[in-house]
Image (spheres, rainbow, N blue to C red):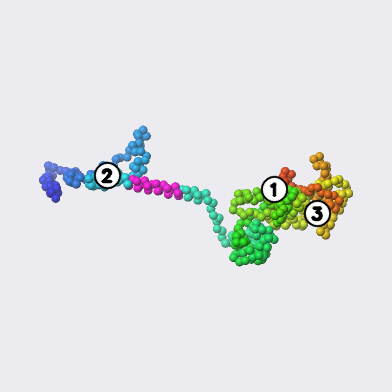
Amino acid sequence: MATIAAAATAFTTLHFSRTSFILPSRRLRTFVTSSFSSTITAEFNIKFAPPKPKPQLPNPSAPDLDPPDSPTSELGDQLFIPWIVRDENGNLTLRSTPPERFLKAMAHQNTQKKKKKDVKSAANKVKQATPSAEPKYSKAARRFYNERFREPPQRLAKVLAAAGVASRRSSEELIFQGKVTVNGSVCNTPQTRVDPDRDVIYVNGNRLPKKLPPKVYLALNKPKGYICSAGEKETKSVMCLFDDFMKSWSKRNPGLPRPRLFTVGRLDVATTGLIIVTNDGEFANKVSHPSSNLSKEYIATINGAVSKRHLFAISEGTVIEGVHCTPDSVELLPQQPDISRPRLRIVVHEGRNHEVRELVKNAGLQIHALKRVRIGGFRLPSDLALGKHVELSSANLRALGWKS
């Protein structure tokens, strides 16, 4: 109160005259404010922050006073905000720099923002790399596709065989035994029409995959001592020659079930040469059925001499299973220096069981070795070793009379 009274007294002692002492209004306000500020500052010990320095252009030659790791460098160019803090004596003081804990909080906030930005950027990259989902088509478009391009429902036994569960006959036995369920109900009819994409099929408690394995067509150079059936475990089967092929199936075709391979037709244990292996039942029936009229060429190595009489007897044919079978052609091949025994080229088209052996036996000859080298228009590759296989191309399938 004493201070305010002194100020009022000092103010009343001032005499202003229009003629002798004239001050502009601006200078008068400055004078009065300076008087009050000097008096109040001395009493309350309040310090004002210095004015904000003018921004200076960066000088490349000048040294950087603030290291890059300092708190002030992390704040960057920001507005000047005075901070009211207490000093060591407990008095309020205005500061131009924020407290240390605030600098740490801002540094932590900037770090969190950077992490969120990095996570968002990584998520965008993953989203761009991930293929987009298939577009949803209209109901009319789906109906058009289903009516014209979608495969019709197939017999249950055929679906099980195509999925590699077992052969068609073994699949029928599983169905008769009640080990197959369709959409939660036990199915005892192998002729039931099902769609693997829509129907839920279980075999022995294991669900049948929706995706069926792709069609496989292979040509094998069968060695001697192997049978063409997988049922007898005491005898070596040609299926064991495809163990490496089946083991590497998952790497070559990820996400697809393994196919169940079987032979198209048969060759006896002692016969070598060409045999087709596939998982396509329709293709196997087409090629092996007599109506296909596919000729099969064999090379028979004979023990002993061969005369024209023997050739005539073979061309006359013989009766096999009550049916008279005659070959398409019989030819004595030229003698080769590395093969001492005579060889016969015999072409048949019916494919009866042991037909070639019965024809040669009926002529009074004995076969030393028998090899099949051709089926239809497809010939066994000369560089294909025994026990090896090769995948058939579209041209090879057409040569076998199959249009895929």
At x 86%, y 45%, the residue is 305
Q: Is residue 306 left or right of residue 113?
A: right
Instruction: Give the CA separation, mark 2 to mark 1.
Output: 87 Å
Q: Sequence-wise, which precedes: disc 2 or disc 3?
A: 2
Q: Is residue 291 left or right of residue 365?
A: left
Q: Amino acid at mark 3?
A: Glu
- Residue at which label 2 appears: 95
Q: Sequence-wise, which precedes: disc 2 or disc 1?
A: 2
Q: Sequence-wise, which precedes: disc 1 or disc 3?
A: 3
Any mark on residue 328, and which? none
Name the element at disc 3: helix
- Residue at which label 1 appears: 389
Judging depth in this view, the residue of 66 and 15 nearest the camera is 66
Q: In this picture, is 101 found above or below 153?
A: above
Residue at the extreme right of the image, as rendered: 309
Magenta part of the chain: 102-120
Res 144 seen here: no
- Residue at which label 3 appears: 355
Residue 248 in the magenta stretch? The answer is: no
At x 61%, y 51%, the residue is 250
Instruction: Give the CA separation, mark 2 to mark 3.
Output: 111 Å
Question: Residue 173: percent from the left, percent from the top?
Answer: 68, 63
At x 68%, y 55%, the residue is 280
Residue 115 in the magenta stretch? The answer is: yes
Residue at the extreme front of the image, as rendered: 234
Res 236 seen here: yes
Mark 3: few, some, or many residues within 10 Å (few <14, many ≥20)? Answer: many
Question: Residue 211: percent from the left, percent from the top?
Answer: 61, 57
Q: Amino acid at mark 1?
A: His
